[in-house]
Amino acid sequence: MGDNKGMDRRGFLKTAAFSSLALGGAAALAGCAPAAGTDGGTALSSTGDIAWDKEVDVLVLGSGTGAFAALVAAAKGAGSVCLVEKGTMWGGTAATSGGGLAVPLTYAAADAGVSDSKEEIVKYFKNASDGRVDEAVLNSFIDNGSDFIDWISEEMGWKFVASPLFGDYYEPMEGWIPMGRGSLGAANADGPMIASQMWEEMKAKMEGYGVEILMGTEATELITDGAGAVLGAVCGDQNIKAGSVIVATGGFDHNDEMRAKYHPFKIMATNAVPTNTGDGQLMGMAIGANVSYMDRCWGAPAILTTGDDPATLIAEGTIAQEIAGTDWAMYRGLPGAVVVNKKGRRIGNEAGPYDLFNQAFAYYDTGEPGHVNIPAYFICDAACWATYSLPGHTVGAVGEGDGSYFDETYGGEATDPAEVPAHFVQADTLEELAGKLGIDPAGLTAEIAAFNENAAKGTDPVYHRGEKHLDINTTGVMAGSRTDLANPVLAPLATGPFYGAIYVPGTCGTAGGLTINENAQVVNTAGEPIEHLYAVGNCSSGVSGGTYVHGGISLGSGGVMSWVAVNHAMGATA
């Protein structure tokens, strides 16, 4: 990936392949039988003696943003640290990401010549979140962000660099700046890293400090005393006593019941790991914790490549595990491509931020009651198909294809352009394509005719595609920074055959969870801290009011608030 410091653009945003890690575990302490467990999402209150199998100073639940918490605790001498991970893959969803961290007012921004201030950051977050942000928590994030980045840079030997890609998403809201807050990329001595590399290095570092890591171990209950203070947690078949418990169990993307209860429209695909089932939220609520922003997600729409029937996903409220089709901006914003609904109408600015585009699915048609944009349809023409790689369709090897971000990052041996993947349909005319996809033919042809007339001139008077900074400096880069077009992200859909695929709302994580205060302490429904309990990452209420303010906010806020949580816990127990 490109940036002003000459770093390789591939390094920071490339989606890591899922890695398989050996299943870890630890035997229960000899002679101690665990107390009888209950179903997940319940609380085990202490009404007498509890048979503890293990005692630690800090217990971290989850290895995504939880890895930051465990590392900080171990390195700063918080005492004995145990991290439990429900799955068998180290790092959870975090380790499958590009690894960019959104943290403001850092040396990386200063190195890039970015001019910014706390006042402008607060203004931007408040405007982007429609005033939903908790200003005390936001201030804590801003005030501690630079210290966290300085510390982890020294601790890990990393160098962070600011990039113009995936900057502030809500342009032109007051407080917006083009770069410097979002997606800081990390590099080690060998060069830029993606998240999987970062998480492996953190794992090795914390193991060197003696952190006990229990893989394949699910936390099911928080154990409290009679006053409601947290004493520890049930993890697998062990009761683990802890001075502080830091919950970092991720979102609830794969919990059908919770999505149906909290989300305002159907989420049909996710690239979050399957273990993200809302465990932390449910355990916290069981002991009286408050929750916030449960209606929000980190939106990541997708071309549906899994073969799932969209009608079934909608009717049954289930979700597809989608990796290849997740659309960060390298599909819908390509020249010669659009996304339309069943009426044939475009649904938004295809070159804009993925989370903002995902919000277009929330539109409710009051004339024909229903979410008319769900599902939607990706459509491109023959020129786009021949020029760009798409899921299951690769135009050439790395460095020998279209020159786009997708080809440089994911490219491999070229596929036969005549072979159409099963998740795409092909047709000689738009009318025929509409019939195959279930789109109104008259609506589609009229929409594309109007779109083409403007696209040929490089304009989009409806959604203003290509007019914003991110359109050009993120989507445009992924499209190869075209100089042969009047607008680098716009071209007519002029030549058949045409190609189409089902396009659905998705997530890379849910954005609501246990309500935290400025110390990352979980609070109850009265707003009072629950003693010894902290939450960070996607299982918490976060720092941005559930709003995807810029790329990397989930990882960045998770890291900073892990720093805040550990420092508070150490001060509180010193």
Image: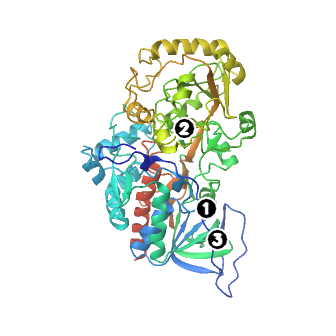
Dot label at residue 234: 3
Q: Quadrant of the N terminus?
A: top left
Is residue 527 visible to us here? no
What is the x, y in percent for residue 565? 43, 64
Q: Amino acid at mark 3?
A: Val
At 45% across and 63% down in the image, what residue appears? 68
Tag 1 near tag 2, CB within 8 Å = no
The residue sitting at 30% across, 51% down in the picture is 108
For badge 1, the amino acid type reads Ser
Say how many tags the image has: 3
Q: Earlier in the sequence, mark 1 or mark 2?
A: 1
**Residue pointed to by mark 2:** 327
Drawn side of residue 35 relative to residue 8, left or right = right
Q: CA distance from mark 2 to mark 3?
A: 38 Å
State whether residue 497 is above or below residue 132. above
Residue of label 1: 20
Residue 494 horizontal side relative to residue 115, left or right: right
Amino acid type of the residue that numbered disc 2 sits on in the rendered structure:
Asp
